[in-house]
Amino acid sequence: MISRRPRLVRTAGFVSALVIASLLVTPAVESGSVDHAAHAAGTTIPGTNCPAFPADNVWNTPITGLPVSSESATWLGAMDASTTDLHPDYGPSGDPASPYGIPWEVVPAKTQFTRVAFQYASESYRGLYPLSASTPIEGGSDRHALMVDPRKSASLPACTLLETWDTTYRPGGRSSAGSGAEWNLRSNALRPAGFTSADAAGLPILPGLVNFNEVASGSMDHAIRFTAQCTQESYVWPARHEAGQANSNCPPMGARFRLSASFSLPSSECSAFCQTVISTMKMYGLILADNGSNWYFQGTADRRWSYNDVDQLKRIPASAFVAVDESCLMVNPNSGQALQPGTPAYTQKC
């Protein structure tokens, strides 16, 4: 099991032309309702025919109808929700070439795959990675590298997501990372139980990032990744790994939180970009994925973010959230497939 040092400050990330490409989305859905036809269309990654996991994946499932968890008040207290506002962990850094956020890329054709030496090798995918001198790597202590390969290789299917943490590229097969994982983006399969990934919860990072193109479109149809300073020594579905402390008041990895449907900000204080993120937090919520500062939520490194785009979101109080119980969505503990609102199975269980 991995115990990682909490990331308590925003970290700058390198951005390339590929980084500013973001996930395409389905048409906008009115907050508080679910357009099942639009939702079923799913989300694709630009420049590929790859989905950002199936449309019925837990990341892509609305949670507006889920019950409040019996642990909600306790977990909110442990995260100082009554005195904390949300903090976008992305945006301008003062250096236009290196905005805050987590960079990613669609792997260029003919990229050579290389072997990576891992600190936590027993829990990492130990195949080859498309890591090269041009791969964008997050700045700061986390040094995430997120790579989407749309092409089939000898060892991996088409539409594979590979992610590493604490990444250092060195030529000649001498690259290293703390941990690494791979996902078939057309599958709902989870990591093995107890395994980490490029984040402490054993979850993928890319599908939980706020990205510019989605927000600009007016629709972002997936949950958002966020951090908490205090997590307990346990995890709940769909998380696969814990990196917490012996404090049962803290939330477990994988806990999901929903913004109150009654919360609002006036248009004078919250632009269309801001309103889109708020609507997403009401419909899809936040998933606790790593240790770090309380209520920091992550997005892509993108030069197009403005200070206004991120600063307006700092007006969202953590006290406007509740933890929800999403256990009824689970179809299989080893799968990220989730029961969908409006289906008979969902109605019966949730």
Image (cartoon, helix red, strand yellow):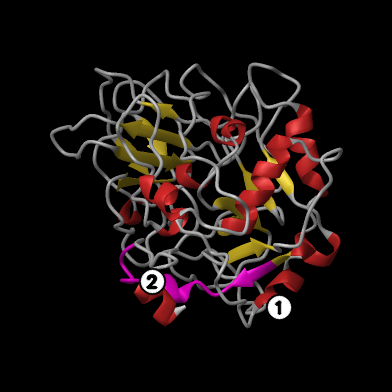
* Mark 2 element type: loop
Comes first in the chain, label 1 or label 2: 1
Lateral position of residue 68 relative to residue 317, left or right: left
Vertical arrangement, residue 215 with respect to residue 334, above or below: above
Q: Quadrant of the N terminus?
A: bottom left
Query: Is residue 329 found left or right of 88 in the rendered image?
Result: left
What is the span of residues highlighted in magenta in the rendered image? 322-335
Question: Is 66 in front, or is 326?
Answer: 66
Residue tagged by mark 2? Answer: 330
- Residue at 68% x, 73% y: name it: 75
Q: Is residue 330 magenta?
A: yes
Can residue 59 be seen here? The reply is: yes
Badge nearest the viewer, 1 or 2: 2
Q: Secondary structure at mark 1?
A: helix
Circles 1 and 2: CB atoms closer than 8 Å: no
Where is residue 33? Give x, y as percent: 57, 58
* Label of residue 74 in the image: 1
**Badge 1: how crowded within 10 Å, few (<14), some, or many (20+)?**
some
As for residue 4 lying within the magenta part, the answer is no
